[in-house]
Image (cartoon, grey):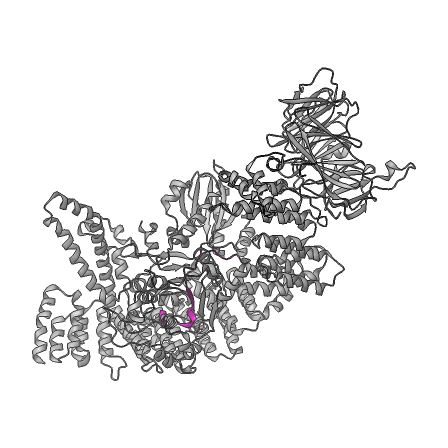
């Protein structure tokens, strides 16, 4: 299980392994509180994140975890462990399930007296505890605890809180819990890596988080972490500041995988046919062919680390070049004549084989993606997006969008396009907006009246307002012509010609500073925040002296860019691109790591706001 | 002469020196009081029982006074509870009174009542005879002996758990003496019965032990355990003092006092000598039968300390202690120890005498030892002038050492500075260096706080650079709590004074101070103070407790901690649902969170809430959502009508119109279902049209189109695909020949291909406009023809498009197409 290894976490400037170890220790302490054999009962939404913190084998071998179950209302499978630990997110619907399980167990009884524990991730919640009390099962729990899992290290430069509904909760329902969690995670981060001296932010959410941070700092009673700051700047970007970017189709390798197949906690499930050899296909039964194949995507895989942030059009070239080198390396065995040479070759073999396997995997994934990206639907949609972002005919009803509705293409695709049009036209004329709305209701169903309301509340759709898009576009150079997809020289390559606004903000902050774009910042929604946290003299970074051999390294600035309300893989790619673009271009080397409430795509963002009748009917889950 | 007051006792020397001349001199006669003194230089409690001393029988209750070790009155009170058996101090300088009925009352040193607890039912029922207060590993313990000669004890008065000790067999009269010893970390009682000793423990075990006493020495009538509980002294009827270990296994000596009178007090001086007090005579007996006697001028009271003995008299407070080895090494006459020589050298140096050099040369090799000795000796020295001389000597010696680490010297200077401060009679804590080491600095600071000497405590903390969280902040918090108790002060002013001092002090818990104020019934003050609390999680519950609902809610919201907001919201809702809505109305965040909560419970609740808020738009939305949970079409229509009215109320005509159409649609759908027997439930209009067309119900579809004003183009696209799906190729062909068709012919081709009918698709190819030709040819899979068309129109772009689509073509065709590529260049 590559995800369990942590070696890929400490390759960047900031050793995120430290954070992972911190969580791991905390979690093990939590489960070690009860002695004896245990079974862990997992909320489905948590298995992914926890796989990144503590692997199953460790729990089994050293912490007496004998069984792992999925939390399900049908109850728990039989087991004879002493302790049952429910590990759940603080959600009311999950409490129902937990209660059901507990009641079932009570009826069953059993030879071994079991003790039940409940571990909330990331925090205890009053409402949930109340619910359990109402259900009359709270007393059956020996222990109700919390495990404050905030930012989960995904990669050496990527942290995510994996709060899938963060955008909706925060911006639609005014429930700022996720901002509070974000602030708490930032406090933990500062405790481990030192106080971050400079904080910048844009947007309402950013302002709130900065205020919470200030309060939390006061609450700690002036006990500052006694560590030299390892992170120089924190940039908080509220998703509301840039809603356009996530709506566009990401064109990096990783972005496309996410757009098409949906990456979840760095795992992706793909249709299996491409990954079986001819032989396997013959032997394997029909059902196995249906079962999707699971892959872990992180930079532990060398090839993936190289490919993930490339424009998809550049992936083919790299893959075939890689194929050639690997074949060449395999061919070395023919050249090896002496025993010593053979030995050397054999020692390289495992690495080579892994590389070859990875190459095969990514060739297949690329083929799967290409099937989609070559389709007319994809290309036409992309063309439509580009026309809109260029500001062409954005004030009229777009015939392509109209056709998409008529042909009942996926709702999320339609909504994305309309929202893009709304942004690029600084809102839509009432006539146009009402037309679209009526079309959507007639085509996709009346319930989407509420979906459309949500989009209006979130600012995705709005009536015509003052012109600003053109100014923003020009000042921030959002549209870049002749972008080089193979050897990019600008972040715009991640959307083949569109530079993500959010990342431009980060870029301008680093150089020449936000003062140069005051006008644009004022046009973007929400306030601008700047805050300096005083660092005691002794902990400040020493100015690297001229004679110091490491002077250039010493001055490298590390910025944590934190997206409140989600970030796309393409934006992450753009920031990684900036981090590599150091001295040659600007003279000021700048490194970035990314933090986020969750990772999103345009579709998942639309999904958060869409009314889903099926879900409503099936589980009685409240809509949106 | 430094050694003038040294008295030899065996191989050691003892010194008795005055610590304070008592402030109470002339006012207090110790002989007329029951005395209790706290160890480690603690305060003195005096109990004067008039009823016992007065010749006339009075009913007057006893008077209790507490003095500092320097004899300064702290407070006085008249006792008004039950009969006091024993009075004593706990390790944290609380004054304990144990009453006849086993009730223990705890006071602070200013005689403020703190708490009370009992020593068990049996003690209460049959009364107690005697009680002992002893230091235990858990804190301070109390042991009581009941009138039935049973012993009960608790080893920690802070969380009293009473245990009964084993019974002593055959004990039917009160023992002459008993005490508590700590053996194996556990308190046990040692009870004398005639010449025998019984050791009883909590496990119900007893051991009968017979100390190794000479014949005919008589019954044991007094005993004393040393400070460290390791040694024991016994006094017998025949005037013999027996000294041994507390487990009675070892005897050091027997000393005959020739007094048949038991001493008033039998105590230990440190752990090295036993002291007996007879009226004004003090006899010190060493373990080797050596002895010293002191005649006192007035009656005295003796207090055992870790490293000596405090002698409290009417006029003075003296300290008797063994001369520490290092002091002896330096000051003993004729000592040639390096320290002694260095001390001399330093003195000569100050006199500018060259002998200094000579002396230094003598001890050149052992200079470090000498310096250390001087530093240590300074620590044990009570007199500041001598301390200074010793330190000066150390400092002088240090000059000759190259790599001597200065920490020890600096630390000692700092410790002495603190010690001299607290020893000053205005503070009155006569602590020795050894005692301070044992007590530790934090405890000393606590003790200053207990004495309400906040300023001095803060100064000491700052001087010693103790972190604020353990030092200054903590002290100031205590100070604030103390301030809060002073009811005479104006609340407004008090709140300001406290906040001014504390607001920039990190780590002070304002909520603690506030709850203190609340306990004292000063609500307004509490509210004011609470405003300064930075931790919302502490602040909010207290605000709720005080009924400051609005403030609690605001603070909870400000904190961003949603769980805290819910705590307040639910509490408020349970309290009064009427005011509740009014209250949260003006608070959007509280509102949203409450709605969020309701949404998870029941959407109807949310609806009501929006209704209360006059938010018709959201109310309408809720109704729409809820309508989907209803099965009956008319019920659903009814609810949608309500929703429509909501939208009309907020003048959103668009939404109202859409809702109206939906009502119409579901009614039509219902009717269709009855007519055709097919289900159309929950289908969108477009899907309904599609289904109708697939089913061939074109008339109905047309009717719907008109009724709902479906745009032509969308209707056509729907129709084309629906016809293709139903395989009605004739109808499809007919449709394609309609004049002024709003859709292009390519749609027909696409629809055919979607249903995998390339034969039908190809029929339309001839009518494709030239600019779409290539695309359509590719769509039907005619790649070669497409390539040719592209060459015809000289379109490189089209050709590339064909190439990109070749993936799905057969290999042969693909090769053919690729082979055509050069032609494109030629034609150009």
Residue B792 in sight: yes
Q: Which quadrant is home to the C terminus of chain A?
A: bottom left
Residue at the (32%, 67%) spot, across then down: A578
The image shows residue A112, relative to residue A451, as above or below, that is above
Q: Is residue A227 magenta?
A: yes
x then y, percent, for residue A501: 36, 73
Q: Is residue B727 magenta?
A: no
Front residue of A189/A338: it is: A338
Residue at the (66%, 55%) spot, across then down: B455
Front residue of A133/B449: it is: B449
The image shows residue B533, relative to residue A65, as above or below, that is below
Q: Is residue B37 left or right of residue B52?
A: left
- The residue lying furthest to the top in this view is B215
Instruction: Count the numbered circles shown.
Output: 0
Q: Which residues are magenta?
A: A222-246
x then y, percent, for residue B321: 67, 35
Residue A556 in sight: no
x then y, percent, for residue B254: 69, 21
Front residue of A353/B605: it is: A353
Residue B196 is drawn in which quadrant?
top right
x then y, percent, for residue A399: 31, 79
- The residue lying furthest to the bottom in this view is B740
- The residue lying furthest to the right in this view is B56
Q: Is residue B159 left or right of residue A318?
A: right
């Amino acid at each position: 299980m590559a995800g369990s290894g942590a070696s890929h976490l400490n390759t960047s400037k900031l050793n995120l392994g430290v954070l992972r170890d911190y969580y791991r220790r905390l979690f093990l302490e939590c489960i070690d509180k009860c002695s004896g054999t245990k079974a862990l009962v997992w909320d489905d939404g948590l298995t992914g994140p926890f796989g990144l913190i503590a692997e199953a084998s460790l729990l089994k071998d050293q912490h007496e975890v004998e069984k792992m179950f999925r939390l399900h209302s049908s109850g728990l499978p039989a087991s004879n462990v002493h302790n049952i630990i429910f590990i759940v997110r603080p959600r009311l619907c999950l409490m129902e399930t937990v209660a059901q399980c507990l009641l079932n167990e009570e009826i069953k009884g059993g030879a071994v007296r079991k003790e039940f524990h409940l571990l909330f991730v990331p925090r205890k919640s009053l409402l949930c505890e109340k619910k359990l009390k109402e259900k009359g099962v709270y007393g059956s729990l020996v222990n109700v605890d919390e495990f404050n899992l905030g930012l989960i290290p995904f990669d050496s430069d990527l942290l995510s809180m994996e709060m899938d509904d963060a955008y909706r909760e925060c911006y639609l329902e005014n429930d700022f819990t996720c901002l509070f969690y974000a602030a708490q995670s930032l406090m933990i981060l500062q405790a481990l890596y030192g106080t971050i001296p400079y904080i910048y932010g844009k947007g309402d959410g950013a302002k709130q988080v900065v205020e919470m941070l200030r309060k939390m700092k006061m609450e700690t009673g002036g006990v500052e972490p006694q560590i030299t700051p390892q992170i120089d700047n924190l940039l908080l970007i509220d998703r509301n500041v840039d809603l356009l970017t996530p709506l566009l189709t990401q064109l990096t390798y990783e972005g496309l995988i996410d757009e098409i197949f949906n990456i979840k906690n760095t795992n992706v499930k793909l249709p299996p046919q491409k990954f079986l050899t001819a032989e396997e296909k013959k032997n394997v039964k029909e059902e196995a062919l249906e079962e999707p194949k699971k892959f872990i995507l992180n930079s532990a895989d060398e090839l993936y680390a190289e490919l993930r942030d490339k424009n998809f059009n550049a992936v083919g070239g790299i893959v075939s070049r890689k194929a050639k080198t690997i074949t060449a390396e395999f061919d070395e065995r023919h050249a090896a004549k002496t025993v010593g040479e053979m030995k050397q070759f054999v020692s390289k073999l495992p690495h080579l084989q892994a590389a070859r396997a990875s190459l095969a995997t990514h060739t297949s994934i690329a083929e799967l993606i290409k099937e989609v990206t070559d389709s007319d639907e994809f290309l036409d949609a992309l063309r439509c997006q580009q026309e809109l972002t260029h500001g062409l005919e954005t004030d009229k009803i777009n015939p392509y969008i109209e056709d998409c509705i008529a042909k009942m293409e996926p709702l999320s695709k339609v909504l994305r396009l309309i929202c893009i049009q709304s942004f690029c036209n600084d809102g839509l004329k009432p006539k146009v907006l009402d037309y679209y709305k009526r079309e959507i209701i007639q085509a996709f169903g009346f319930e989407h009246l509420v979906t459309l309301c949500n989009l209006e509340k979130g600012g995705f759709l709005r009536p015509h307002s003052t012109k600003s898009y053109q100014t923003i576009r020009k000042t921030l150079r959002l549209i870049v012509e002749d972008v080089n997809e193979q050897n990019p020289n600008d972040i715009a390559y991640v959307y083949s010609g569109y530079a993500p606004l959010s990342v431009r903000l980060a870029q301008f902050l680093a150089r020449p500073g936000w003062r140069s774009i005051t006008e644009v910042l004022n046009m973007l929604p929400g306030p601008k925040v700047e805050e300096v946290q005083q660092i005691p003299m002794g902990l400040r970074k020493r100015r690297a002296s001229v004679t110091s051999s490491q002077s250039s390294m010493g001055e490298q600035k590390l910025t944590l860019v934190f997206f409140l309300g989600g970030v796309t893989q393409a934006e992450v790619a753009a920031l990684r691109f900036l981090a590599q673009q150091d001295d040659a271009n600007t003279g000021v080397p700048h490194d970035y790591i990314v933090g986020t409430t969750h990772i999103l795509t345009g579709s998942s963002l639309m999904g958060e706001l869409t009314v889903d009748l099926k879900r409503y009917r099936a589980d009685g889950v409240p809509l949106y | 002469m430094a050694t003038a007051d040294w008295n030899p006792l065996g191989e050691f020397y003892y010194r008795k020196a005055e610590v304070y001349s008592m402030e109470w001199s002339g006012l207090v006669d110790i002989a007329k009081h029951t005395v209790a003194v706290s160890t480690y230089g603690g305060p003195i409690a005096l109990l004067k029982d008039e009823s016992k001393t007065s010749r006339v029988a009075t009913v007057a209750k006893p008077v209790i006074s507490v003095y500092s070790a320097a004899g300064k009155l702290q407070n006085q009170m008249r006792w008004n509870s039950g009969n006091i058996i024993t009075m004593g101090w706990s390790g944290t300088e609380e004054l304990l009174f144990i009453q006849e009925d086993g009730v223990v009352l705890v006071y602070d040193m200013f005689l403020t009542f703190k708490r009370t607890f009992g020593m068990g039912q049996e003690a209460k029922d049959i009364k107690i005879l005697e009680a002992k207060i002893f230091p235990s590993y858990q804190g301070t313990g109390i042991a009581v002996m009941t009138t039935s000669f049973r012993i009960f004890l608790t080893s920690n008065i802070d969380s009293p758990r009473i245990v009964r000790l084993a019974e002593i067999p055959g004990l039917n009269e009160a023992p002459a003496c008993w005490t508590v010893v700590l053996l194996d970390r556990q308190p046990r009682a040692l009870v004398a019965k005639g010449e025998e000793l019984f050791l009883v423990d909590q496990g119900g075990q007893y051991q009968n032990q017979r100390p190794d006493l000479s014949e005919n020495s008589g019954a044991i009538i007094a005993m004393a355990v040393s400070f460290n509980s390791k040694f024991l002294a016994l006094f017998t009827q025949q005037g013999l003092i027996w000294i041994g270990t507390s487990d009675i296994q070892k005897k050091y000596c027997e000393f005959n006092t020739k007094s048949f009178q038991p001493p008033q007090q039998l105590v230990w001086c440190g752990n090295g000598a036993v002291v007996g007090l007879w009226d004004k005579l003090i006899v010190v007996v060493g373990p080797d039968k050596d002895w010293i006697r002191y005649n006192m001028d007035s009656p005295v009271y003796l207090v055992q300390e870790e490293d000596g003995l405090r002698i409290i008299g009417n006029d003075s407070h003296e300290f008797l202690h063994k001369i520490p080895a290092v002091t002896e090494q330096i000051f003993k006459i004729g000592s040639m120890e390096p320290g002694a020589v260095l001390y001399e050298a330093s003195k000569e140096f100050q006199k500018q005498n060259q002998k200094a050099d000579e002396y230094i040369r003598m001890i050149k090799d052992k200079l470090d030892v000498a310096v250390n000795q001087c530093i240590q000796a300074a620590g044990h020295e009570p007199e500041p002038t001598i301390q200074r001389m010793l330190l000066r000597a150390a400092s002088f010696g240090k000059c000759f050492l190259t790599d001597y680490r200065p920490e020890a010297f600096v630390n000692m200077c700092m410790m002495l500075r603190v010690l001299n401060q607290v020893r000053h009679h205005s503070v009155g804590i006569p602590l020795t260096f050894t005692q301070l080491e044992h007590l530790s600095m934090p405890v000393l600071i606590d003790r200053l706080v207990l004495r309400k000497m906040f300023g001095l405590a803060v100064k000491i903390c700052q001087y010693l650079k103790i972190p604020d969280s353990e030092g200054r902040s903590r002290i100031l918090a205590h100070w604030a709590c103390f301030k809060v108790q002073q009811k005479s002060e104006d609340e407004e002013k008090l709140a300001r004074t406290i906040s001014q001092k504390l607001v920039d002090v990190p780590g002070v818990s304002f909520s603690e101070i506030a709850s203190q104020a609340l306990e004292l019934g000063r609500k307004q003050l509490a509210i004011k103070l609470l405003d300064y609390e930075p931790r919302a999680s502490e602040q909010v519950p207290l605000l709720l407790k005080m009924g400051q609902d609005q403030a609690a809610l605001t603070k909870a919201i400000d904190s961003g901690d949603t769980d805290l907001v819910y705590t307040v919201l639910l509490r408020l809702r349970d309290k009064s649902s009427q005011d509740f809505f009014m209250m949260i109305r003006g608070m959007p965040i509280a509102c949203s969170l409450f709605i969020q909560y309701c949404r998870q419970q029941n959407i109807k609740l949310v609806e009501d809430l929006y209704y209360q808020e006059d938010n018709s738009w959201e109310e309408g939305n809720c109704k729409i959502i809820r309508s989907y949970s209803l099965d009956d079409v008319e019920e659903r229509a009814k609810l949608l009508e309500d929703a429509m009215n909501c939208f009309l109320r907020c003048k959103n005509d668009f939404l109202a119109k859409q809702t109206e159409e939906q009502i119409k649609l579901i009614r039509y759908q219902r009717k269709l279902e009855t007519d055709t027997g097919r289900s159309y439930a929950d289908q969108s209009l477009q899907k309904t049209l599609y289904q109708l067309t697939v089913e061939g119900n074109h008339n109905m579809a047309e009717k719907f189109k008109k009724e709902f004003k479906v745009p032509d183009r969308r209707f056509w696209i729907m129709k084309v695909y629906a016809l293709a799906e139903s395989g009605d190729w004739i109808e499809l062909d007919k449709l394609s020949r309609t004049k002024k068709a709003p859709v292009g012919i390519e749609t027909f081709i696409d629809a055919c291909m979607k249903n995998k009918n390339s034969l039908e698709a190809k029929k339309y190819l001839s009518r494709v406009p030239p600019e779409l030709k290539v695309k359509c040819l590719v769509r039907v899979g005619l790649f070669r023809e497409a390539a040719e068309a592209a060459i015809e129109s000289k379109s490189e772009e089209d050709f590339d498009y064909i190439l990109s689509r070749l993936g799905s073509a057969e290999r042969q065709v693909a090769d053919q197409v690729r082979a055509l590529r050069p032609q494109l260049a030629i034609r150009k």
